[in-house]
Each structure stands twice: as C-alpha cells, then as structure tokens.
Image (tube, rainbow, N blue to C red):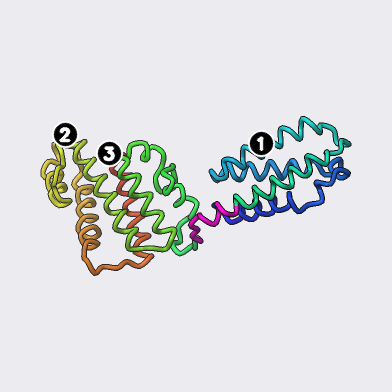
Amino acid sequence: MKLINILDLGMNLEYMWLSDMWRPNVWSKKGKRMLGMLGEARDILEGEGMGETVVKDLSRWITRLKKDYPKENTKISQEDVKELVRESAKWHQGIREEIEQKSMIEVGLQTGLNPKELAKVVNQQPSDFIPAEVLAKMTSIEKSDLSDAAKCLLSGTATPSVMVALRGAEASLRNFYSCKTKTDPSTKTWRQLTKVLKDKGEELGIESTFVGYLDYIGEAKRNFAQHPNKVYLMREAVIIFMQVAALVGDIYTKI
C-alpha cells in the first residue's frame, strides 16, 4: 500500500468523525466537500483491496446523502449526524487495525532500476523488462520466478534475486529445448541441454552464437551461483536480472 494513500485515508476517515461538518447547520455549506472525502476514502480502499465492509458502508452513505440532501441549502438531520459520527469512528478504527496487519517495506533506489517497472514484473504485468508479447508466451513458473526476483531487488536482497532469476532462466531454456526438439528435457542439466542444441543447431535452425550465449549464462552465471558460499552484491544481482530478462525475451522471439 502506498504511504501517500495511508496518509490520505487516515486524514479523510479521522476528519469525518472529528469535523464540525456534521453539525446540521453547516451541511448546506460543506456537504459537497464531505461527499468528496467519503468518495475518496472509498476509492483508495477499493484500489488497495482493503476494507470490503467499509467500502460498502461508504457507498451506502454516499448514495443515501445524495438522495436525502440533494440541494445545497438542505440541513442534515441530527439523527444522521450521530449515526455518521459513530460509523466513521468505527471505519477509522477498523482500517487502522487492518493496516497494522500489513507488512510494509520501504523501497529504496538501491538497484538503479525503475521501481515502477520492477513492480510490474512483480505483478506479472508487461514492463520495460518483460514486454507483453514475451509475457504472453512465458510459463507460469517463469513468470513466478521473475516476479520473485524483482521482489528481492525491490527489498534489497541481492543473492536470493540471482538464485530465483536463474531458475526462471533455466525454465525458459527447458521450454525452448522442448519446443525446438519436440522432446522432453526431462532430467537433463543446463550443459546437456545446450550440447544437444549445439549438435543439432543447423538442423533445428538455431544460430551457434545463440547457443554460445546460452552456454555463457549457464557456465558463467548459473553454475557459479550454485556455489554454497557465493554471496552477491546488488550491482551483480541487477546485471544478472537484466541478462535473464534479455535471455527470456530472446528465447521467446525464437519460439
């Protein structure tokens, strides 16, 4: 949840039950503003997928107030004031408790990458890293692995990002192998897969330079990452994430 949304939501909900807007004689002057705050609070909650009951209550009150007090010079009844004050205090407390249960991570720009585009990868949406035409061809495993790798980058954890990104790269390689050879990659290792692709490259229409690129990722990146004592810097994790994203893109332009 965006911090600015938390701020706006808290201000709106608290204002509802502390404000003098609920005095019957001021509704005629400030009713539209209050309806606007009710609507904004509802929209924030809907956008964040929170407070389902509160969203329904807010929608119900917006409809009711517009119906019962359609004119600007209409005074709100004392009964409605009391009920709204009571309910808005309940909404405020309920949403506060729900936000307290959410785990929050502040995203720092440690990667040098666009965090908005990384967030799209996390949510398995088209991005600068994974365009729509590539994303549409990827398997669920690849999407999940690249999503997790992007999450790790956003939270500043380099080594896990590398591990899961390279796992996604291997899933892409296996899918490429299966599509090109029409056989099951089964338990073959990365090196065994690329050896078959190299041996049958001319027959399968695969450029030797591309197989060499696959070999490079396998030997220089994936195998090295499997070392039990290997720890990655964020700079290295960013480079490997970008290489994997490019590899996946290249693979699916050839399938």
Number of numbered discs: 3
Residue on which disc 1 sits: 59
What x and y, as percent, mark residue 206? Answer: 20, 41
What amino acid does circle 3 point to?
Answer: Lys
Query: Residue 222's image quarter?
Result: bottom left
What numbered label is drawn on residue 157? none
Magenta stretch: includes residue 4: no
* Kind of element beneath mark 1: helix
Horizontally, is 85 left or right of 104 in the view?
right
Spatial distance from mark 3 to mark 2, Cα to Cα? 15 Å
* Marks 2 and 1 in Cβ contact (< 8 Å): no
Q: Nearer the viewer, mark 1 or mark 3?
A: 1
What amino acid does circle 2 point to?
Answer: Lys
Residue on which disc 3 sits: 254
Horizontally, is 4 left or right of 104 in the view?
right
* Kind of element beneath mark 2: loop
Q: Residues within 10 Å of mark 3 (few under 14, many from 20)?
A: few
Residue at the (86%, 35%) spot, across then down: 74
| Up/down of 32 relative to 212, above or below | above
Q: Earlier in the sequence, mark 2 or mark 1?
A: 1
Residue on which disc 2 sits: 182
* Kind of element beneath mark 3: helix
What amino acid does circle 1 point to?
Answer: Ser
Q: Which residues are magenta?
A: 96-106
Observer-nearest of 93 and 107: 93
Spatial distance from mark 2 to mark 1, Cα to Cα? 55 Å
Residue at the (88%, 44%) spot, across then down: 25
Q: Residues within 10 Å of mark 1 (few under 14, many from 20)?
A: some
Observer-nearest of 194 and 35: 35
What x and y, as percent, mark residue 29? Answer: 86, 43
Q: Nearer the viewer, mark 2 or mark 1?
A: 1
* Marks 1 and 3 in Cβ contact (< 8 Å): no
